Amino acid sequence: MIIENENINDKIKTLDDLESIVQNLKKEGKSVVLCHGVFDGGVHPGHIQYLSCARKQGDILIATVTKDEHVERGPGRPVIGEELRAESLGALQCVDYVAINPHRTAVEIIQRLRPDVYAKGEEFSKLQDETGKIKLEIDAIQSVGGKMYFTHGITFSSSSLINNNDSFTLYSKEARDFLKLFKTRYTSDYIHECLKDLASMRTVVVGESIIDEYHYCNSMGKSPKENIIPYQFLREERFGGGSVATANNIAGFCKEVELFSMFGSKSNEDNNFLIKNLRSNVTPHIVYADDRPTIKKRRGVDSVSYKKLFGQYFLNDTLIDTVLEEKIIEELKPVVKDSDLVVISDYGHGFITRRIVNFLSEQGRFLAVNAQTNSANTGFNTIHKYPKANYVCIDHAEARLAVQNRFQPLRTVCDEILRLGEYKKIAITEGHKGSLVYSSEEGYHSIPVFSQHIVDTMGAGDAYLSLTAPIVARNQPMDLVGFVGNAAGALAVTTIGNQTIHPGTLYKLITTLLK
């Protein structure tokens, strides 16, 4: 039953208010039940069944909703804001109080409110929660003397309703059509198991380490004396980029990752920043080049729109000397020999020489390559550099540069790339168009983009390479490879800078897409 509108706001409380209310209720001998969730897409029959069933376990029912910024169901979610979601719950007669959860999980709410019962839907009863949050919630309710209760009844999914409802238009028609067919071949559980299977892989990452700096600033208008636009510096943010980002993303899924890279002078404080930003299961093998700085790419970024305004690069992209080259190869020999996968993040800044390429091409058990084109090397760092690779991952501009083909269809470009060397499988990313993947066994698959909301494209290509290379090495189908790669890219473009993809967040997005 729905209650009158004027009573709804009386139900919505802050967490501080609820803490006091619950204490008084318990003094009166009332038992309190807590439900927590996103409750996106409007209150549907599944929500009502869940809340009604939970209400029967006590005298008072409190429902808390996840704050917008903490919803981890992929780009564009939630489709309904936190305040309206709270009001929708408050309109239900079975719900006594509602609050918006300011914390990332329900653990803090349980610890503060100390409910007698914490209720979750039946779908969580098997604890198939890749983020580990359900187990933490069970531990929390038990720690305050309460009990866990799983409701029973019909199960509806907000994500399923949103994914299949054209009125929400969260994904393009192309994406919806693709997902409808894709779901007939794969389940989220199967893909999760594929990703978990990567844990035992021993992976080597080779490439330049880069510090990505964002200098946020405001335009001050044109200078009256010169033809320049001055910017007021506000603050700075730094990210571990290049091969550091690749290694960190892979390390979220593979337990053993070895990074071979190059820094500038040993006394450079930038080096400490990069080392500190490596995941704990990444083992660094660093050579130091005294004739160059640690690579740093600084971008001026508008503080309001987050649009990049200008760039300033600190680098020396001449090839390293033969002494360093020999040292790298000698250090690589014992590690590459025992590795399952070698991933090359080649930014064309002088670290990866012809000898290193030939060594890795011959000795790597499975070689995945990204030869990047950027403003410092346009036209001089293409996939030509590699005589063979098990997996090539490049973007559409890099592909077209490699074969000098600007206008023909991308599949034609890919066919021409296959004639450049011994390449087994290829992925070409196309930005807002998604990606094209190929293998000789399967032919081509076009995978649409899963994000309509883009904050910053920095790191999207690194995320795609990092997540797909191990899956290709496990010989998974290429449409699955492209799906996971585009999911990783969709997460990467919703954050500022080169940030690491968290496995739990990726698992949640995959589950959301396939509901």
Image (cartoon, rainbow, N blue to C red):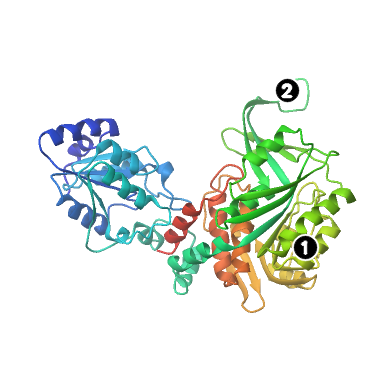
On screen, residue 63 above or below 440: above
**Residue at the right extreme of this rendering:** 322
> Which residue in the structure is indicated by mark 1?
360
- Going 65% across and 59% down the picture, which residue do you hit? 203
**Total tally of numbered discs in the picture:** 2
On screen, residue 135 above or below 110: below
Out of 123 and 178, give the one closest to the viewer.
Answer: 123
Residue 330: quadrant of the picture: bottom right
Residue 228, how many percent across, how many down? 75, 28
The amino acid type found where label 2 is placed reads Ser
Residue 223: mark in rendering = 2
The amino acid type found where label 1 is placed reads Leu
Q: Is residue 395 visible?
A: no
Q: Of the two numbered discs 1 and 2 on the same chain, state the one appearing first in sequence.
A: 2
Q: In what element is the residue under mark 2?
A: loop
Out of 403 and 222, give the one closest to the viewer.
Answer: 403
On screen, residue 360 above or below 320: below
Residue 98, how many percent across, how many down? 25, 40
Out of 18 and 307, give the one closest to the viewer.
Answer: 18
Residue 69: quadrant of the picture: top left
Residue 439, how many percent across, how many down? 65, 74
Q: CA distance from mark 1 to mark 2?
A: 52 Å
Label 2: few (<14), some or many (≥20) within 10 Å? Answer: few
Task: Left or right? Give the position of 416 relative to 155.
Answer: right
- Going 62% across and 68% down the picture, which residue do you hit? 472
Q: In what element is the residue under mark 1?
A: helix
